[in-house]
Image (cartoon, rainbow, N blue to C red):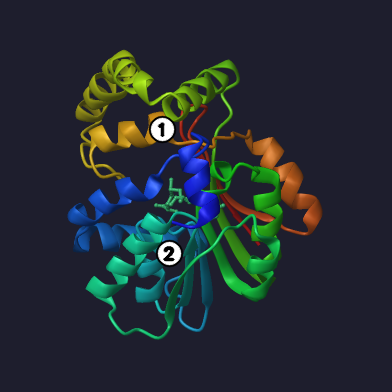
């Protein structure tokens, strides 16, 4: 563990996302990889990424880095959590061992000098990450600075649900700062996070989780996912539009709990 990361975890300021990603590796299969490729093709409006350079900020499991690489991009992945970095490396070992066009590193998007040193990219991808850094606005700026002129920025940011988001922020803080509270928080929220959501998925015929591993581990990820910030679409647009970026796609979670996805150019 990097000293900063481990001290943040020890002081209850940060959730260890990477531990959960390790479990995800066991459910990765060809279908999931193809789905990830399809998402990138659809959101970026491309058939292939040949000749593109792709930066995956907060690569987590490494699934989307792998998808970008399979679509032909040269990929640079980094993550702040050493266990996430290990997952991305394991993904590469399994599917692209020895591939010199996929580089993986440990680093933080909040380290402006580190990000600057990576150069500029045709595609900067950061799904569900910038709101978990502890300083979302600084993370926005550093991610945008890694874009080559004409490049695409694809990000997903938690929706701001007002008082509901404030409630989840408190739950997440407690989950990380007071480990003894965890069984209680799980018991309290499992009926909603497991049973109700399972019933809704069953009704909609969507039992397979798009990005997750299992409803149980997704629940732990949700309860523990801290630092945590949220933003309404207008706040995200107000940040990026004056910086010369144009909104190409917006896929919202329809006001519910979840992420809004944005593609800027
Ligand atoms: C919810 S996961 C998303 C993973 C992946 N992008 C995906 O879509 O599956 C958030 C990831 O962001 C990483 N992260 C948090 N803070 C970060 C930072 N300052 N710099 C880079 N990565 C960070 C976490 O370690 C974790 O792997």
Residue 70 lies, in percent from the top left, at 34, 75
* Residue at the limit of the structure toward the right, as seen here: 242
Residue 77 in sight from this viewpoint: yes
Of callouts 1 and 2, the N-terminal one: 2
Q: Nearer the viewer, residue 104 or 8?
A: 8
Q: Quadrant of residue 67?
A: bottom left
Residue 173: x %, y % from top left: 50, 26
Res. 37 visible in picture: no
At mark 1, the secondary structure is: helix
Residue drawn 68% across and 59% down?
A: 142
The residue that mark 1 highlights is: 224
- Where is 194 relative to 159, above or below? above
Please tell me how crowded label 1 is: few (under 14), some (14-19), or many (20+) other residues with Cα within 10 Å: many
| CB of mark 1 near ligand 1 (< 8 Å) | no
Q: Quadrant of residue 221?
A: top left
> Can you tell which mark lies on residue 95?
none
Q: Quadrant of the C terminus?
A: bottom right
The quadrant the N terminus occupies is: bottom left
Q: Which residue is mark 2?
A: 41
Which of labels 1 and 2 is toward the front? 1
Against 138, residue 206 (above or below) is above
Give residue 219's position: percent from left, percent from top: 32, 31
SS state under label 2: helix
**Looking at the image, is 214 positioned above or below residue 119?**
above
Tell me: 114 left or right of 172. Answer: right
Which residue does the image show at 25% across and 57% down from the upper left?
32
Question: Nearest the camera: 135 or 235?
Answer: 135
Q: Relative to residue 243, is residue 153 drawn left or right?
A: left
């Amino acid at each position: 563990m990097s000293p900063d990361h481990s001290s943040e975890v020890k002081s209850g300021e940060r959730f260890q996302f990477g531990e959960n990603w390790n479990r995800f590796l066991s459910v990765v299969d060809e279908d999931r990889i193809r789905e990830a490729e399809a998402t990138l093709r659809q959101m970026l409006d491309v058939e292939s990424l040949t000749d593109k350079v792709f930066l995956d900020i907060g690569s987590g499991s490494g699934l989307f880095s792998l998808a970008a690489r399979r679509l032909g991009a040269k990929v640079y992945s980094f993550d702040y959590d050493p266990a996430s970095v290990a997952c991305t490396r394991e993904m590469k070992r399994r599917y692209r061992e020895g591939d010199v066009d996929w580089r993986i590193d440990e680093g933080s998007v909040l380290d402006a000098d580190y990000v600057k040193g990576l150069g500029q990219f045709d595609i900067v991808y950061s799904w569900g990450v910038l709101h978990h850094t502890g300083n979302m606005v600084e993370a926005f700026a550093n991610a945008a600075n890694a874009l080559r002129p004409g490049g695409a920025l694809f990000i997903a940011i938690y929706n701001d649900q007002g008082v509901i988001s404030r409630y989840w922020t408190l739950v997440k803080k407690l989950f990380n700062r007071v480990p003894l509270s965890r069984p209680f928080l799980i018991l309290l929220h499992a009926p909603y996070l497991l049973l109700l959501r399972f019933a809704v998925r069953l009704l909609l015929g969507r039992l397979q989780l798009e990005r997750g591993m299992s409803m149980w581990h997704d629940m732990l990820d949700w309860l523990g996912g801290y630092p945590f910030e949220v933003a309404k679409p207008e706040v995200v647009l107000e940040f990026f539009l004056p910086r010369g970026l144009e909104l190409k796609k917006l896929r919202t979670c329809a006001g519910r709990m979840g992420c809004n996805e944005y593609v800027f150019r």
